[in-house]
Image (cartoon, rainbow, N blue to C red):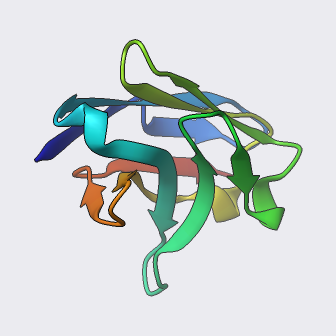
Amino acid sequence: QVQLVESGGGLVQAGGSLRLSCAASGSTFSINAMGWYRQAPGKQRELVATITRLGITNLADSVKGRFTISRDNAKNTVYLQMISLKPEDTAVYYCNARTWAGGDHWGQGTQVTVSS
């Protein structure tokens, strides 16, 4: 099993920055990709960014140029640096770990609120 613990959410004004962290524990050897998804009220959960163990990244078009995903494999931690935040970035952000076998593990979620 894989456990994920997120941190770094909070309230920020539009144009501000936040950094989210997600630390994995347990069967971390089984993890290939890690990433972030978000879910705003009344909307479906959507992909924000992912990064593979080899460092290949994928970002949603809506966050390209503003968000950066990075990973420290030695610490089993993935980061999401967010700048130029917009009110539409307000959501619960969930950390995801996908195993080599294709299984998904989720964190408990961290709230990001961007005020206008």
Whether residue 101 sits left or right of residue 50 in the image: it is: left
Question: What residue sits 79% from the left and 38% below the top?
Answer: 15
Outermost residue toward the front in this view: 101
Location of residue 60 with respect to 34 vertically, above or below: below
Viewer-closest of 86 and 55: 55
Asked whether residue 20 is in view, the answer is no
Rendering coords of residue 6 (x, y %): 31, 36
Q: Is residue 76 above or below residue 104?
A: above
The one of 115 and 64 positioned closer to us in this rendering: 64
Q: Residue at x 29, y 65 (%)?
A: 103
Image coords of residue 87 (percent x, y): 67, 58
Q: For the image shown, how many numbered marks are present on the structure?
A: 0
Residue 46 located left or right of residue 75: right
Residue 92: image x %, image y %?
40, 58
Q: Is residue 78 visible?
A: yes
Q: Which residue is nearer to you in this view: 14 or 31?
A: 31
Residue in the picture at 73% in, 55% down: 59
The residue located at (70%, 42%) in the rendering is: 56
- Is residue 87 shown above or below 56? below
Residue sitting at the far right: 65
| Rendering coords of residue 53 (x, y %) | 53, 36
